[in-house]
Image: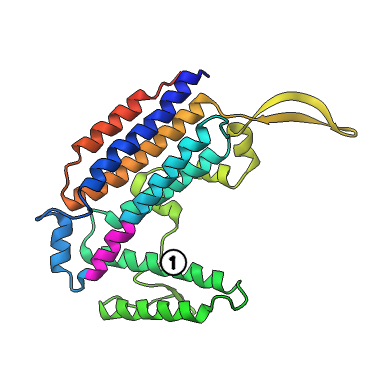
Amino acid sequence: MTKNAISKSISSVEDFLEQTGKVWAGYEHKPFPNSIAAKELSSFIRPESIGTAYSQAATLIEVAADYAFALKSTLTEPAQSIAPWTCVRGCLEAASLSMWLFDTKIDAKERVRRSLAFRYEGLDQQAKLAETTKGIVNPKDIHKRINQIEQLAQELGYPRVLNKKNKRIGVGQEMPSVTKIVKKMLNKEQNYRLLSGMVHAHPWALQHFGFIQTHSEQIIFENVKGAYFEKHITLDSINFLCVETIQCMFEALKMNFDLFGWDIKPIALATKSAVDQIQFE
């Protein structure tokens, strides 16, 4: 593994983020006239709900970019062998959720339905967190907010989302798992599960991608033989992580650009240039 090859891989992510960030920010999040987004904002019964969905999706792109910047830090000497996988999993997750909300293949009603489900999921998790704070945060305040969002959903024509026991399990719709969203939007279930294996520190993943065996048949405890492992990351793994980050970021940006009617060509060129910069051995 050469330092030059590693440097080029890391630089490819940095260059991609710098170039695409300038283009993305230049549009100031304003959809062009006659774009899908502009039509939704002018036709949906409650434009604020469409705007909320767009804001959620744009924030998720910012989240994905933050993880991508963090990837660069984890791969810069002294490089880590576990943390980079966490960064890319976070990037993949945020990018796929952004695409799910920015989806150009759905109508405004479905977009708001997904936005409501995402809001409910977050507030439900916040309520569970509040319950662990022993009164520092009142869960009732959060449940009150959930009730308000559910009331809004009903006013917009969405039925309540209940299970067989008549318990609320969503607003607008039940929120799909992130794994399902990654599969639906990016067709990267396999990669996501691999990244998750590293994040959750499963031995099968760590021994293949986070460590390297240095000695075998060693006495590690009294009367116990085993192998010694050291933390290690290969160039192939670094390249995989960098390409995965660039590609999922591009797909999320492309969905945003297509929905808002922006010119995707500069982003596509930056993506190709970044991937071409990565050297596989």
Seen as rendered, the residue at the extreme right is 222
Residue topped by disc 1: 121
**Magenta stretch secondary structure, dominant:** helix
When asked about the image quadrant of residue 55, the answer is: bottom left
Which residue is found at the position 41% from the left and 70% from the top? 120
Q: Residue at x 44, y 54 (%)?
A: 178
Image-based side of 35 in relation to 136, left or right: left
Q: Residue furthest left?
A: 34
Q: Position of residue 202 (x, y in %)?
A: 63, 43
Q: Is residue 242 left or right of residue 211?
A: left
Tell me the amino acid under the disc marked 1.
Answer: Glu
- Magenta stretch, residue numbers: 48-57
Is 223 rendered above or below residue 95? above
Magenta stretch: residue 49 in it?
A: yes
Considering the numbered disc 1 on the image, is that residue within a helix, a strand or a loop? helix
Q: Can residue 96 be seen from the camera position used here?
A: no
Residue 132 in picture, x, y percent from top left: 61, 71
Which residue is drawn at the image coordinates 24% and 70% (left, top)?
48
Q: Quadrant of residue 156?
A: bottom left
| Crowd band around label 1 with a 10 angstrom C-alpha radius: few (<14), some (14–19), many (20+) | some
Q: Look at the image and tell me whether residue 204 can be seen.
A: yes
